[in-house]
Image (cartoon, helix red, strand yellow):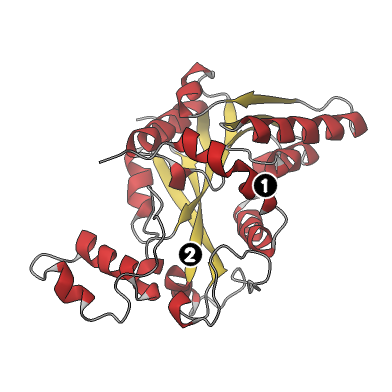
Amino acid sequence: MLQFDCKTHWQRVAASYRDTMHTPYNKNRLEMVDALLEKSDLSGSVLDFGCGDGVMSESVLSAGGSVHAVDLEPSMVESTQCLLEQWAERHPGANYSVQRGGVEGLSSLTEGSFDTILAINVLAYMNGGEERQFYTQSKRLLRSGGVLLVTHSNELFDLYTLNKYTQLFFKHHFSTHAAMDEVGSLLVHPDEPDRRIFPVRENPLNYRYKLGSYGFMEERQEFSIFHKLPPLLMEGFDPDDLQSRDYPDTIHWPASERWKLMFMCSIFGSRAISLPQR
């Protein structure tokens, strides 16, 4: 089976990704990230891994922190460098660095040198080996009590979509006796959509156990990109149209209703702290 190549992927989609930065979609996702952050998270030393256009790195400087921004794609690195240079011109003394690279470069950074690590819209594009390396290096790089804040493609959303991905979820987690065609026969559209799925996806119900295996304790989750109906029931739904859809608030739902977000939102974010070494 072919492995997903994160570097090749970003070289191919970087231009279109930059176009999404100022869409309602990205605004909704950043609102989720802001809800997970505490004021002190960005005021220390921060690693912005997969920095994209640099918007989170700029937020670090605005909070009085220092930031080391990293991205695979040269155009993203250039965008971040340009943004932070402009910020530094207005605010002399800004402490930042920008580097091109991926998980393989994390081993060269100094152990215990960061208070916070951000990985926003990054982990879904890694293969298994890269993902393991990311968590291992994040644990090494964070000071005890430091914050790891990541976003993920939500695997539980597949149970809500009632399509091909529902069938695959059943196969991966529940199917011990029933054949795939038997499960598919219960769905009206078992072959849709014709889209490639992310290499790494997470179930928000058990993600804390993965974090625990690397020495982290999850403190909080938030959700974004709410779907009022399964996508196949949304008339004219285009998953690539990030401009014309409205994304309702998901941060201030009543506690008794928040369980629904685990299924009706396609993205979730997680805030965890690095536990002391035993």
Q: Is residue 137 above or below residue 179?
A: above
Q: Which residue is mark 1?
A: 18
- Horizontal relation, residue 172 to residue 145: left or right: left
Q: Quadrant of the N terminus?
A: top left
- Residue at the spot 41% in from the left edge and 60% down from the top edge: 195
- Residue 151 at x, y = what percent? 51, 51
Q: Residue furthest right?
A: 90
Task: Place residue 159 in its image quadrant.
Answer: bottom left
**Residue 86 falls left or right of residue 197:** right
> Which is more N-terminal, label 1 or label 2?
1
Q: Quadrant of the C terminus?
A: top left
The kind of residue tagged 1 is Arg
- Residue at the extreme left: 177
Q: Nearer the observer, disc 2 or disc 1?
A: 1
Q: Which residue bears the numbered disc 2?
A: 266
Disc 2 residue type (three-letter): Ser
